[in-house]
Image (spheres, grey):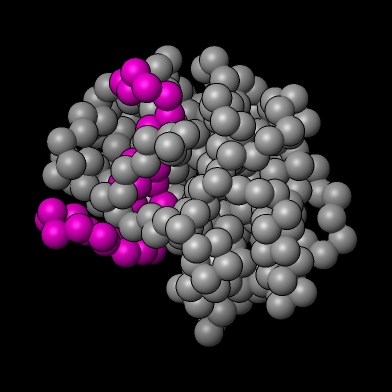
Amino acid sequence: MTKTGLKITVLSENTVGAPLGLVGEWGLALLVETPDAKLLFDTGEQGFAVANAAALGIDLKTVDAVVLSHGHYDHTGGLKSFLRLRGRIPIYAHPDVFALRYAALHQERYIGIPFRRAEIESLGAEFVFVTGPKEIAPGLWVSGQVPRRTGFEKGDARLFCLKDGARKPDPFNDDMSLYAVTSKGIMVILGCAHAGVVNIVEHAREVTGVEKIYGILGGTHLGPVAEEQRRATIDYLQRLGLEFLAANHCTGLPVSAALAHRFGDRFRHAPVGSVFELPLA
């Protein structure tokens, strides 16, 4: 475990940033370490996070718990590979994580968790379902369900779910983030930010009682949303006075390039293999 503060290692992401035998995939998995806890935040799509961790010299058998940001295949598909290595472990998730989820892209397809709950429980998953904020280690919070307060964060209209046999827009009640309180402010760690980046950040302030947002890392889902939401969100981020921004995964390369231009040396790319010790000097 880190003795200096907060350490985040990218184990699964769309791109690879170093020639270390690492594998990229459409997905996200982050190893989040504090002096008191070692968490796996999401597991990627196909289980490459396990091999990538080994290539980086990381022993995932020492992970204390898993947190699932939401129930999409690209954030949960690596669960079986991880559980076969780690065995019995608590997994924090929202009760709606197993919702029947679909995307209407080139054709409609299922994009929810690719396993039955019983199957992954038989491999050692001990689900701890949370709906409200929960401090799972000193200064490290699971957001719980994020209140929707902005008018412009409407999400991705292509995503829907089936409930009682009916097709409905996916409310993403299970979209959760991590809030880590550092000496310089809150570090907001995103999965896909389906609840809206602004909603998530304002919720972080309420949950922790800390006003200063030090940084943001993870998937912002600003690539697929409407231009109004994208523009308003980026303007909001600029007003925060962030010292660190590493937007990856569902942010998309065009939006990442725009953020790099806007934030200059405060922006970091975060492909597989990236390691961030925070707060940064």
Is 5 magenta? The answer is yes
Q: Main secondary structure of the magenta part?
A: loop
Q: Which of 130 and 181 is in front in this view?
A: 181
Q: Position of residue 89 (x, y in %)?
A: 39, 22
Residue 219 in view: yes
Q: Where is residue 229 in the image (x, y as percent from the top left)?
A: 74, 69
Q: Where is residue 193 in the image (x, y as percent from the top left)?
A: 62, 53
Q: Nearer the viewer, residue 73 or 118?
A: 73
Q: Name above or below for residue 238 compared with residue 278.
A: below
Residue interval drawn in magenta: 1-30
Q: Image check: 276 left or right of 197? A: left
Q: Image check: 206 left or right of 12? A: right
Residue placed at 57% from the left, 20% from the top?
Answer: 139
Q: Image check: 9 left or right of 69? A: left
Residue 122 in view: no
Q: Name above or below for residue 250 compared with residue 64.
A: below
Quarter of the rendering occupied by the C terminus: top left
Q: Where is residue 21 in the image (x, y as percent from the top left)?
A: 12, 56
Residue placed at 58% from the left, 58% from the top?
Answer: 220
Q: Which of 141 and 235 is in front in this view?
A: 235
User: Quarter of the image holding residue 130?
Assistant: top right
Residue placed at 71% from the left, 76% from the top?
Answer: 226
